[in-house]
Amino acid sequence: MSKKPRVKLPKSAQKGEIVEVKTLATHGMETGNRKGKDGNKIPRLILNKFTCSFGGKEIFSADMHPSVSANPYIAFNIRAESSGEYTFTWIDDNKEVTEVKETMTVS
Amino acid sequence: MTKTNENMVRVDRREALKVAGASVLAIGFASTAHATPEDAVKYIGEKTGGAAATEGSAKVTIKLPEIAENGATVPITVVVDSPMTDADHVKHIHLVADGNPSPQIVSFNLTPGCGKAEVSTRIRLGKTQNVIAAAVMSDGSVHTNKQEVKVTIGGCGG
Amino acid sequence: MHKVKSVTAMAVLLGAGLALGACTTESTTKDVMKHPYKEVWSGYSTATPETRAMQDDDFANPYMPYVDAAAELWDTPAGEAKKSCADCHGAPDDAKGGSMGIPMKGVGAKYPAYDPESHGPINVELRIQKCQTDHQKAKPFKYESDELLGMTGLVVMQSRGMKRETKAAEQSDPLYPAWLQGKAFYYQRRGQLDLACKHCHEDNAAILVRAELLSQGQSNGFPTYRLKWQKPGSLHRRFRGCNNNIRSEPYAYGSDEYLALETYLAWRGRGLPIEGPSVRK
């Protein structure tokens, strides 16, 4: 990805609180169904996997297909258990990995 | 050759256009295969290991616009009624379209760490069709619900 | 059923066009300043709640990653001069406008401005390019490139909520000739469909053509993330799309014709709040 994905995670939360996480990546999500100007099919190139993990453990993930819009937006929830770093990763069809880390303080 | 010529009937221009239009239409349908409601059901069956699904389940709420302004970016939110505890939680939410080139849209994999089974994203819908959300619970039960979205060819100008 | 409806709609549109085409559109000097609309409205007001929600939430607005990238470029020294935007202007939202005292706030509401060098209008995109060439001694971003779209979004955003203003319709204003040229463009029939801007956006604004609700063609939401494009785009891209749609040859990005039209459109949308980068269908 040429542009850094956006992640919105609250800086702090109460223990047990359920917080909303929003993510927005920048990617054309080429479906593989379109034809280019030369009449040939444009090969499929999408982000196919999104993962949110904490302490090496997956909390939430998504398996994406070409019917996900360009610039994928995914919002979900997590329960704040302890302070630490959350890792967000996006993987495309070429196995290129984009990673963003965000810290949340839980009190 | 001669026979063909003899059999030819004068076709006026309007008629010819109609024919041309119709043939394009026929080719159009032949070349772009679309998923059918049966394909969608089959796909859900594959993803859920064939468990009997509770259709039209009150546990699954889909928030989708009734009419999408543009099929390229349709916001969707799915909420599944679940306590999200270790003993009782939603494991997967599969979003399926019954009129896109392929039925699968996205599968969300949830854990009790989510606290709440509510996810939002934006999806592509090629035409007016049903979007089905299938929730797989930790006890293996499957709950589905669906909603129709009317897709307009919105936004003129290239 | 569908067919009948669409034909009726097109007939209404074309009929109205023909009827008005017969009338003279050239205004007298006296009512040159008279506004063509009783009420101006933004495309936002007719967007669906879902599209509005996407624009209202700055995080969820899909234009914003481009603006994020531009914010990094803003602070990055570039060109032979090794100067960054911040070196002269401070932070994008600096009310004082940094060491040069030229704040970005207000730019989106006042542009296109008069450029003494070209003796004509200059829009935000071209002004950014000019800054790159003149002050950074750098190769400017290409028109409609991700970088320029991001930077335009970042600059225009500083004027969000401010009202569009222009004096271009006053004879004493240096932009007056461009305003006249833009006005002529607006009322000029063109393309195979033989339609002028006004046929859709003045005579039939707020009317449905099949499923398409015609807008006033206002520019206050630009640059915009268009759901149809699935990416950000400039006002000139929209002009090109419009021209293509009526099957007329589009003009180049940053061309005099489109700059004049942009100048004229700003006047038609006076008082509308700046929304860029907006989200539109």
Image (cartoon, rainbow, N blue to C red):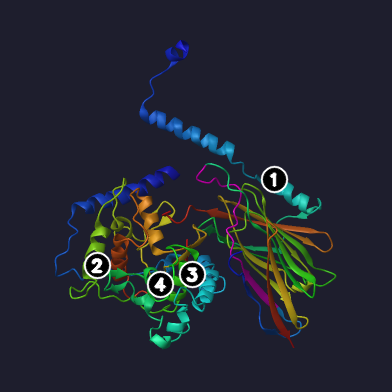
Quadrant for residue C224, please give it: bottom left
Density class for disc 1 (Cα within 10 Å; few <14, some 14-19, many ≥20) is some
Q: Which residue is disc 2 drawn over?
A: C179
Label 4: state its secondary structure: helix
Q: Which residue is disc 4 drawn over?
A: C128
Q: Is residue A93 above or below residue C92?
A: above
Say which chain tag 4 marks. C
Q: Choose mark 4 or mark 3, whichever is in front.
A: 4
* CB atoms of marks 4 and 3 within 8 Å: no
Q: Residue at x 56, y 47 (%)?
A: A34
Q: Which amino acid is tagged 3?
A: Gly
Q: Which mark is residue B39?
A: 1
Density class for disc 2 (Cα within 10 Å; few <14, some 14-19, many ≥20) is many
Density class for disc 4 (Cα within 10 Å; few <14, some 14-19, many ≥20) is some
Q: Choose mark 2 or mark 3, whichever is in front.
A: 3
Q: Which residue extends farthest top?
A: B2
